[in-house]
Image: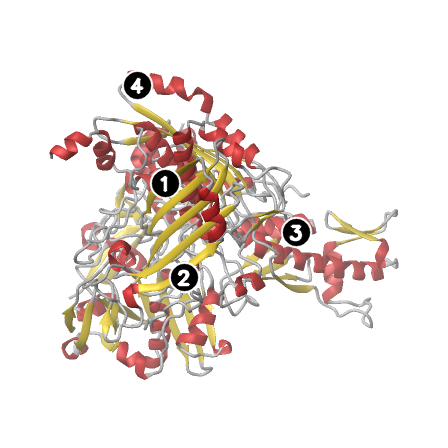
Amino acid sequence: MTSPVSMTVNGKAVTATVEPRTLLVQYLREHLGLTGTHVGCDTSQCGACVVHLDGKSIKSCTILAVQAAGGTVTTIEGLAKGSELHPMQAAFREHHGLQCGFCTPGMVMSAVDLAQRKSDLSEHEVREWLEGNICRCTGYHNIVKAIQAGAAAMGSAKA
Amino acid sequence: MSAQGIGEPVRRKEDFRFLTGQGTYTDDMNRPGQLYAYILRSPHAHAELNGIDISKAQAGPGVEAIFSGKDMEADGVGGLPCGWLIHSKDGSPMNEPPHPPLAVGRVRHVGDSVAVIIAATREQAKDAAELIKVDYKELPAVVAVEDATKAGKPQLFDAAPNNLCYDWHLGDKAATEAAFAKAHHVTKIDLVNNRLVPNAMEPRSAIGEYDRATGLHTLYTTSQNPHVIRLLMGAFVLHLPEHKLRVVAPDVGGGFGSKIFHYAEEAIVTWAAAKIQKPVKWTSDRSEAFITDAHGRDHVTHAELAMDKDGKFLGLHVQTLANMGAYLSTFSSCVPTYLYATLLAGTYTTPAIYAEVKAIFTNTVPVDAYRGAGRPEATYVVERIVETAAREMGIDPAELRRRNFVPRDAYPYQTPVALQYDSGDYFETLDMALKASDYLGFPGRRDEAAKRGKIRGIGMATYIEACGIAPSAVVGSLGARAALYETAQVRVHPTGSVSVFTGSHQHGQGHETTFAQIVADKLGLTVDQVDIVHGDTDKIPFGLGTYGSRSLAVGGSALVMSLDKVIAKGKKIAAHLLEASEADIEFKDGKYTVAGTDKAKTFGEIAMTAYVPHNYPIEELEPGLDETSFYDPKNFTFPSGCHIAEVEIDPETGVVKLVNFTAADDFGRIVNPMIVEGQVHGGLAQGIGQALHEGCIYDRESGQLLTGSYMDYDMPRADDLPNFQVATNVTLCTHNPLGVKGCGEAGAIGAPAAVMNAITHALGIKDLLMPATPQRVWQAINPMRQAAE
């Protein structure tokens, strides 16, 4: 049994016909071909699948596509303006906040949500926020720096 | 040197695609007409496989085919091979039981593969798997090495009595016994190196494809070394000639060793795709990864260190039981032998060493190389026993180490366990670490913490690695079944841009940037003018891949050889164009000049002339500017360093807070300091993870994996770790053209011993099992309360 599910993804209205059990992450990856959102675990721990739903970060492996129907989703593919990186993406590059790149989309989307809440972030605040995002390459050291810098850049862009 | 050359913190070329979701990992790829494979796995640790009833499942919606081990066997598919032959003390070859990609007759660990279901969607394949009835006859299981060697315990293979794979040794037994006979003091310690699950964030994935028109088989896979997979799978498992087998490892989301090995699923999808003539994709989920990706470590060791009255090391005797798991994974056999016992000299002049290693089969996931591979285990033994010896002898741990370090003027230094260190300065790295960690200020910090009711400890570990594996003749004589060359092809295009085809593979290390920096440095280009191509056996001449911190030391050396050939050929072309003698041509900053004149040609002009020549020395020189080199290392490289950990323990909860971690490392010449620091950070997180968080636990009776998800296996999170202080000391490698040593594994090697030395220092105890969880620490603090409960 399948049914059409519609939502707005990265500014575009989309519809795909999916099973009720289809997760949002499968909807994005397998039906829309947005493979920037990754799946790193099956217990909602790793955060590689973080996207924004209606402006807030969520784990797209932990919500059914039908639950997101009618919503507005932003994925990592929707962040940069053409070849111009979003300030958070640019900060990850500048501070070497990524290595293999697999956790990176989830890290960046999670970080953007945090930075939208607060731009002057302490190391402690960033580390606490990242509880739901696992990185195996970087030891987090440079991710923390990148998020602090990215949040500051987003803050000054707003000001 | 250009601004993007060697030594510059150039921002990474690969980042744009990863940051914008444009990376192409294996599971991101889909082939036309592709079907999905799901692998039915054993829920039992040990069982006879008496029958598989697929009748109901075959009729499931979307199901295309179901195969079992017998189907593969009938097609003549071979077992997964082991790449290194170890001989026991008595000269007999190791026991090498067969490892069929799908089990035949018996399953030997939870997760052992039983059948493959291929269907139109992943969900349909999974649904159908639930309809398969497997007739298992459960057998008793054994998971711990201490149990597996005892009489009357379950036997995994008839051909391996007492579950023994090999009983190996290294070093001089008589000399070591003589050293102990004259010892003033002997320090003894029993250690467990806990089993770890590598947990690269990208789960493994494989797509098999077959082209009837050409007879070409293609495998897309999450591998650190696609040529190794082609070699092993082609020659030993599926018997496919290499011109009909292409292996592609696209973007790979971390490896840490676990993606070196040839896994069953690679053979299954490649074989099945040809069988059903449709592409077949398999992707592991994380739960599956826990029970199928090769695990790491898992040693039980007794060690004894003999010293004279001044603490000078006289002899070291080490006995280790190494858990191999249920089958021999690709490089499993060399990890607890040639990558372990050869490192037991550490940074010290211990004159006599004798190591004995028994490798044991158990009903667990196969164990193989994981970041450091043998060297973290060796460092843990050496540095825990040295620290313990310092405490027993009443000598400051830093001072005891200094008394025993290989002297600065002793290089090349021959150890008693086969290696010859080419360069290093352990005194300097120790001093750097002591200073950066404010070692001398520790008592003040301890007293301050005590006022707050907290217990502080400080611990250090020095380490030596043998990286850049390795001289092919040497490893061949030690049992390696393949040479360990690396290749690089430098193709200069007519307008002067460059493509490099390297047998190294990047899965986080940033080769697309660092290798481009080497090219930029040598040819006077920008990194944007250079593309690094890797991961495809159809594009790359050959390669042994990336592991053992070998990419820069071996792959980078091959690259330099090819660049030198390009420059030399360019000189001949320039001499012709400039009407000068080749001996008078100089090349610098991208320009060929006639020495002492202003006559010059740019590198781009030479490249253009090489390809579309109107004026060319065609009688003496072939056109083209495309050079390939194979580099065979002359020796291992020997990165070294000193790590210092400072911990603060809450006696009420047993929680260990890592308040400071300092790493001073010597990696030889550094190409990109930003990337090197990142590599150190990542290694440290894994080493600290081993000491404080991670432990793979099997139920000792049932053989069930108890830590099979991120809810049970404690991956280090951001709030578990501090910022790291890292520094580098440079002594150049003397035998490769870049002077580089490798940096990928160092953090994971030094950190566990440093952290455990700090914890045991704080608590005033000799040992504590890793990971030092709050429960274990609390029990160590409260032995009476533990006994009462």
Tags 2 and 1 touching, CB below 8 Å: no
Mark 2 → mark 3, Cα distance in angstroms: 31 Å
Tags 1 and 4 touching, CB below 8 Å: no
Q: Tell me if mark 2 has few (under 14), some (14-19) or many (20+) residues whose alpha carbon lies within 10 angstroms of its own.
A: many
Q: Nearer the viewer, residue B610 or B138?
A: B138
Residue at numbered disc 4: B450
Pointer 1 indicates a residue of which chain?
A: B
Q: Tag 1 or tag 2, which sits nearer the N-term?
A: 1
Q: Amino acid at mark 3?
A: Pro
Residue at numbered disc 3: B737
Residue B474's x, y, as percent? 56, 61
Residue B515's x, y, as percent? 58, 52
Q: Tag 4 or tag 2, which sits nearer the N-term?
A: 2
Pointer 2 indicates a residue of which chain?
A: B
**Element at badge 3?**
loop
Residue B729's x, y, as percent? 57, 36
Q: Amino acid at mark 1?
A: Lys
Pointer 4 indicates a residue of which chain?
A: B
Q: How is the image coloured?
A: secondary structure
Q: Which label sits on residue B188? A: 1
**Element at badge 4?**
helix
- Viewer-nearest of labels 1 and 4? 1
**Element at badge 1?**
strand
Q: Tell me if mark 4 has few (under 14), some (14-19) or many (20+) residues whose alpha carbon lies within 10 angstroms of its own.
A: few
- Viewer-nearest of labels 2 and 1? 1
